[in-house]
Image: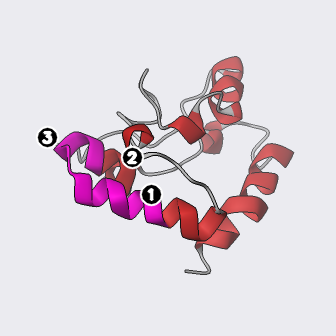
């Protein structure tokens, strides 16, 4: 069952609204295909359907693109639950991420 009260990822991404997360929770192949199309169309990534799985950004089983997340490591180092709680926010990592990904997604 999809956990609507899941805490956001370290970067602030809302897992409860993420198609990849929901597809995993519901084991829904149609949603996995939708997620796959999104990453192909927006970022040119060919992600196999069997890799479209995530238990949430703070879980042990994160989406393939989130492995080695710099925000997770940084938040753990600063002992905060999310980037927004960090005294250095917004830092260069966040600003670079917003420029590279968030602004692109907002073009949809």
Task: State the residue position of label 2.
Answer: 49
Give whichever of 67, 12 is nearer the camera.
67
**How far apart are labels 2 and 1 at the CA level?**
7 Å
**Secondary structure mostly seen in the magenta stretch:** helix
- Residue 24 image position (x, y, % from top left): 28, 42
Q: Residue at x 64, y 40 (%)?
A: 83
Looking at the rendered structure, the secondary structure element under dot 1 is helix
How crowded pointer 3 is (Cα within 10 Å; few <14, some 14-19, many 20+) is rated as: few
Left or right of 21, for residue 65: right
Q: Residue at x 77, y 50 (%)?
A: 90
- Residue 107 image position (x, y, % from top left): 62, 80
In primary-sequence order, the first of circles 3 and 2 is: 3
How crowded pointer 1 is (Cα within 10 Å; few <14, some 14-19, many 20+) is rated as: many
Task: State the residue position of label 3.
Answer: 1
Q: Residue at x 79, y 39 (%)?
A: 88
Q: Is residue 57 magenta?
A: no
Label drawn at residue 47: none
Above or below for 79 versus 93: above
């Amino acid at each position: 069952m999809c956990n609507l009260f899941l805490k956001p990822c370290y970067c602030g991404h809302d897992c409860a609204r993420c198609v990849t997360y929901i597809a995993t929770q519901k084991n829904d192949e149609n949603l996995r295909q939708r997620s796959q199309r999104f990453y192909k169309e927006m970022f040119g990534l060919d992600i196999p359907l069997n890799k479209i799985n995530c238990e949430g950004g703070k879980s042990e089983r994160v989406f393939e693109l989130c492995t080695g997340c710099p925000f997770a490591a940084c938040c753990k180092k600063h002992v905060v639950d999310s980037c927004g709680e960090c005294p250095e926010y917004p830092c260069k990592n966040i600003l670079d991420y917003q420029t590279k990904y968030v602004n692109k997604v907002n073009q949809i």
